[in-house]
Image (cartoon, helix red, strand yellow):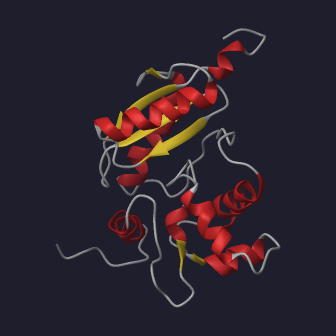
Amino acid sequence: MNSHGQDEQRVVWADVDSAIGPLLLAATGEGLVSVVFHATDEVRAKALERLGARFATEPVEAPDSPLLAEAIRQFAAYFAGERRDFELPLDWSLISGFNRQVLRELASGVPYGAVVGYGDLARRVGQPGAAQAVGTAMGANPLPVVVPCHRVVERDGGIGGFGGGVETKRRLLALEGVLPEPLF
């Protein structure tokens, strides 16, 4: 890194095993920038291609990078039931406007073990008629788990959709004590 911030555009990534399957974590000099579910070879290749295009640099696999070390440690602690909150620098550059506003409110205002409805979250950001747009923001979340879109549910008590799949959402909510653990 130099004093001119040239390293800030560097993107590093690592695969992480978790209770919900393999994850890809990516970071820049600003912080964690992307979490990708079901990080198979094909999913990883597409995610890295998108990150490379967005940041105009080739993402570098660097599981020992100081930019990722704390994120990897906190994810392991979260899935072991030893951590409830992530305390990581985040790079919000992959999301903007209303979506960023909604995700920031979600990250700061919906704690571990709690859920919020799409409409309730829309009201929290001053857009009471925007429940569907909140759903779109959840689907665009580049930082799932850390920015806990799995905690957003339907008004009638339904679990709602999830970019990582409904079963992944169920498992995350069970980990946080919102739902019972699946029997099998």
Name the residue furthest top: 2
Q: Position of residue 6 (x, y in %)?
A: 70, 13
Query: Looking at this view, is 28 or 181 the one in front?
Result: 28
Name the residue furthest bottom: 156
Quadrant where the C terminus sits is: bottom left
Q: Which image quadrant for residue 120?
A: bottom right
Q: Which image quadrant for residue 119?
A: bottom right
Name the residue furthest right: 126
Numbered label tally: 0
Above or below residue 14? Residue 77 is: below
Q: Position of residue 59 (x, y in %)?
A: 50, 23
Above or below residue 141? Residue 63 is: above
Q: Position of residue 163 (x, y in %)?
A: 45, 59
Q: Which image quadrant for residue 4?
A: top right
Query: Looking at this view, is 146 or 141 the one in front?
Result: 141
Q: Position of residue 149 (x, y in %)?
A: 54, 63
At a point 39% along the width and 49% down the height, the residue shown is 37
Quadrant where the N terminus sits is: top right
Above or below residue 42? Residue 109 is: below
At a point 60% along the width and 41% down the height, the residue shown is 88
Judge from the rendering whether residue 139 lies leftward or rightward of residue 173; answer left or right: right
At a point 40% along the width and 64% down the height, the residue shown is 172
